[in-house]
Image: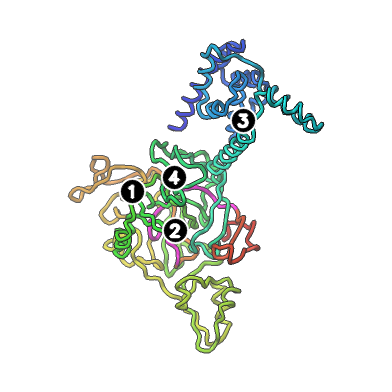
């Protein structure tokens, strides 16, 4: 809503500036106040065809058309400098008001027509090889730009266009960890659509273009936390379905310690003495991030809002029924033999990762087809599943959630917008972060009584939908089992396809040619 208000205020300021500017070209000021008509008159003033005003109705394209129209309006009044073009884009109403009230500013000629004629003449002289006349034309013309300015303007436009596309349409990501193997491999580069699930408009106002949250080399944040805009999402092209991979901001990544290896959430550091000592010893500072600047994660959406999820002997159940498993679902196995020589090249040929520390001790992350092929290498080859009994899991309340581990988890209900639940000491660990952090309420427990926004509370109604994310490499994935629900306002987009893929994340290891231009939504 705030974003819409800002756009409305910008438009009001713009039409007021047109009201005062139009009379300078003998166009009645009232035409600047009439929606639609004002842009048609604007096109006529700068020499563009009237139908170009319709292009302002085309999403995404309209930003570029408006920018060019604003620059051409300024140039039609003799404002040709680079600074004027910059102001025409970022502060259009202010520049137009300046021109309107500047007695020395007068309409010269329709810029679009004049510049088009200039470029046509340049092309004609270049073709004729008339260097003398060309130099003379360039010296006299306000449209001439030297090499430096052309380079700077081209660079700015390229950065602006790339940042715009990245922010509002499609962004490129690389898979850094094996949590989604073998569906998505370390070193896969993929495009992610930001419009499929509804474009989430930017919340962080000031940020370095083309960087997510860190500036390389100097190792500092690439944005200013304030001012910021509230969460707003445009209508979706499709719903978020079960079993689809999706990209989201790491839910617990609002307060993190950034190490050379990765980011660690404050809660992870607090609950791990070894990690806590490491952070303290290396003097890593705590960084607080807004929602849209938390680290990006990609997992498979296992359950949607309103579902009940349970894991029994590694099998996921949704609402009491077996969930569909990815075809290359991976678990940890110990591989050994007494006689058969297990050549590393055999593992490589089967697509089994051998570069990690576990592999040195005979532990590999395999899907069922790989298990069967390894067993066929020899009668003495043993491939043994290793149960994962890690129990330091969400909601981190062993008193009320006994026996939960990576392979046996739940049941747990996924919160749904508009649903009201009763709050009890037995379930509060599941929902307290939702209430206090994701949905921004003041939450406290006073003598056993739940207090929300200063009032005693026995129930709570959820304000948004939540999702449950898990990696296909189930024994090597830090996912919702460890940090809980994925809020709807954290969702970034839908993976589309892999456009490049390096082996183990290094181009020196080779390229997965067979993965290029393949779907990123494999099941």
Q: Residue at x 43, y 70 (%)?
A: 313
Region in magenta: 476-496
> Where in the figure is residue 55, as x and y percent of width and height?
64, 29
Q: Is residue 482 magenta?
A: yes
Q: Residue 342 versus residue 473: which sits nearer the camera?
A: 342
| Looking at the image, residue 83 lies above or below residue 260 | above
Q: CA distance from mark 2 to mark 3?
A: 50 Å
Q: CA distance from mark 3 to mark 1?
A: 49 Å
Label 2: how many residues lie within 10 Å, few (<14), some (14-19) or many (20+)? Answer: some
Which of the 4 image quarters holds residue 38?
Answer: top right
Look at mark 2 in the image and give the residue it sits on.
319
Look at mark 3 in the image and give the residue it sits on.
65
Labelled disc at residue 28: none
Q: CA distance from mark 2 to mark 4?
A: 42 Å
Identify the coloring.
Answer: rainbow
**Residue 305, visible in the rendered structure:** no
Q: Is residue 387 magenta?
A: no
Which of the 4 image quarters holds residue 150?
Answer: top right
Quadrant location of the C terminus in the rendered image: bottom right
**Residue 471, visible in the rendered structure:** yes
Label 4: how many residues lie within 10 Å, few (<14), some (14-19) or many (20+)? Answer: some
Of callouts 1 and 2, which one flags the residue occurring earlier in the amino acid sequence? 2
* Horizontal relation, residue 167 to residue 48: left or right: left
């Amino acid at each position: 809503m705030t974003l819409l208000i800002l756009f409305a205020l910008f438009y009001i300021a713009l039409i007021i500036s047109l009201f005062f500017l139009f009379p300078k070209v003998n166009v009645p000021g009232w035409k600047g106040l009439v929606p639609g008509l004002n842009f048609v008159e604007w096109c006529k003033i700068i020499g563009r065809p009237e139908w170009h005003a319709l292009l302002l109705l085309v999403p995404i394209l309209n930003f570029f058309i408006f920018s060019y129209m604003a620059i051409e309006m300024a140039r039609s009044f003799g404002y040709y400098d680079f600074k004027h073009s910059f102001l025409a884009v970022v502060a259009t109403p202010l520049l137009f008001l300046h021109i309107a009230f500047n007695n020395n500013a007068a309409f010269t000629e329709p810029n679009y027509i004049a510049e088009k004629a200039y470029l046509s003449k340049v092309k004609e002289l270049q073709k004729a090889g008339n260097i003398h006349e060309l130099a003379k034309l360039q010296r006299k013309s306000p449209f001439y730009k030297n090499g430096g300015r052309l380079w700077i303007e081209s660079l700015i436009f390229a950065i602006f266009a790339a940042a715009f596309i990245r922010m509002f349409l499609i962004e490129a990501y690389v898979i850094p960890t094996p949590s989604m193997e073998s569906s998505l491999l370390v070193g896969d580069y993929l495009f992610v659509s930001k419009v499929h699930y509804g474009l989430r408009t930017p919340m962080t106002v000031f940020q370095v273009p083309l960087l997510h949250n860190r500036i390389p080399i100097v190792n500092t944040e690439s944005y200013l936390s304030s001012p910021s805009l509230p969460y707003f999402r445009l209508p979706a092209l499709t719903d978020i379905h079960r079993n689809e991979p999706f990209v989201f901001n790491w839910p617990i990544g609002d307060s993190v310690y950034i190490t050379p290896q990765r980011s660690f959430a404050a809660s992870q550091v607090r609950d791990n003495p070894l990690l806590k000592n490491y952070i303290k010893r290396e003097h890593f500072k705590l960084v607080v991030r807004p929602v849209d600047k938390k680290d990006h994660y990609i997992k498979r959406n296992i359950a949607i809002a309103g579902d009940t999820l349970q894991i029994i002997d590694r099998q996921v159940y949704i609402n009491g029924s077996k969930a569909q498993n990815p075809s290359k679902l991976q678990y940890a196995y110990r591989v050994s033999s007494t006689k058969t020589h297990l050549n590393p090249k055999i593992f490589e040929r089967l697509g089994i990762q051998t570069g990690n520390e576990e592999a040195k001790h005979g532990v590999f992350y395999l899907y069922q087809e790989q298990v069967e092929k390894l067993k066929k290498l020899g009668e003495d080859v043993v491939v043994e599943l290793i149960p994962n009994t890690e129990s330091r899991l969400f909601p981190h309340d062993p008193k009320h959630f006994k026996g939960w581990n990576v392979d046996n988890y739940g049941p747990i209900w996924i919160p749904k917008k508009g649903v009201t639940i009763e709050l009890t000491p037995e379930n509060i660990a599941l929902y307290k972060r939702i209430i206090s952090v994701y949905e921004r309420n003041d939450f406290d427990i006073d003598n056993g009584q739940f207090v929300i926004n200063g009032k005693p509370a026995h129930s709570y109604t959820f304000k948004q939908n939540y999702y449950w994310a898990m990696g296909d490499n189930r024994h090597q994935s830090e996912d919702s089992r460890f940090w809980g629900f994925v809020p709807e306002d954290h969702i970034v987009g839908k993976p589309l396809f892999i456009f490049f893929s390096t082996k183990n994340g290094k181009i020196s290891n080779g390229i997965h040619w067979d993965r290029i231009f393949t779907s990123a939504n494999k099941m």
